[in-house]
């Protein structure tokens, strides 16, 4: 299932349709890949509570310029994909190949915000964000700064 989704996303990115349509499809594929990673982080501790759901919806809406309804639809679709997720590689590869370093760092920042959404950082969420950041080739120093910033924003005391 995930392999089929990845193939569809890659096909969408490589098809030679009109520029506007192709750009819209590319953006949709990148939004879906990012949303799946966000949901996967939220699910990492086996507890997807209301605070995390609200944070995911807010971040998707704000960062992708979507309406609340569009954000909810994307979140629902991403949740279905994340629950079937076997490997992060396809999604991180898609993002790595199509985003700048700054855009990849922004995604890592979003993932830290999700990890801290419930007021604490679970060891599984921490490990998953670090793994994703490695797969996106974001420098460890930058990842640690983003982690610190997300923790401060969430009012979580440093351990």
Image (cartoon, rainbow, N blue to C red):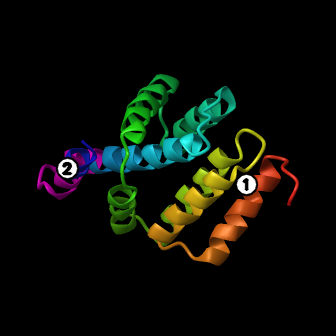
Relative depth, front residue between 150 and 81? 81
Q: What is the magenta range?
A: 8-25
**Mark with earlier residue (1, 2):** 2
In the visual, does 91 lie left or right of 2? Answer: right
Residue 20 visible somewhere in the drawing:
yes
Of the residues tagged 1 and 2, which is closer to the observer?
1
For the residues labelled 1 and 2, the Cα–Cα distance comes to 33 Å
- Could you tell me which secondary element the residue under label 1 belongs to? helix
Counting from the top left corner in percent of width and height, residue 6 is at 25, 51
Mark 1 in CB contact with mark 2 (< 8 angstroms): no
User: What residue did someone put label 1 on?
Assistant: 150
Residue sitting at 46 percent across and 32 percent down?
Answer: 75
Query: Looking at the picture, does residue 59 appear above or below residue 107?
Result: above
Q: Name the residue carrying label 2.
A: 12
Residue 54 colored in magenta in the image: no
Residue at 38% in and 43% down: 32
Q: Quadrant of the C terminus?
A: bottom right
Expressed as whole percent of the image width and height from the top left, the position of residue 29 reads 32, 47
- Left/right placement of residue 129 relative to residue 5 reads right
Residue at 24% from the left image edge and 41% from the top image edge: 1
- Report the residue that reaches farthest toward the top: 69
State the SS at label 2: helix
Image coordinates of residue 78 in percent, x first then y, are 41, 37
The quadrant in which residue 43 appears is: top right
Q: Is residue 12 highlighted in magenta?
A: yes
């Amino acid at each position: 299932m995930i392999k089929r989704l990845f193939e569809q996303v890659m096909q969408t990115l490589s098809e030679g349709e009109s520029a506007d349509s192709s750009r819209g499809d590319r953006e949709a594929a990148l939004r879906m890949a990012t949303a799946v990673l966000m949901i996967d982080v939220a699910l990492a501790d086996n507890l997807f509570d209301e605070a995390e759901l609200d944070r995911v919806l807010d971040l998707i809406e704000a960062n992708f310029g979507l309406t609340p309804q569009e954000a909810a639809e994307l979140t629902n679709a991403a949740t279905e994909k994340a629950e079937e997720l076997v490997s992060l590689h396809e999604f991180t590869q898609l993002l790595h190949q199509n985003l700048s370093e700054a855009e990849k760092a922004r995604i890592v920042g979003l993932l830290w915000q999700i990890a801290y959404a419930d007021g604490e950082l679970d060891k599984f969420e921490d490990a998953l964000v670090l793994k994703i950041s490695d797969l996106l080739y974001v420098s460890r120093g930058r990842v640690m700064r983003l982690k610190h910033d997300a923790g401060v924003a969430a009012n979580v005391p440093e351990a």
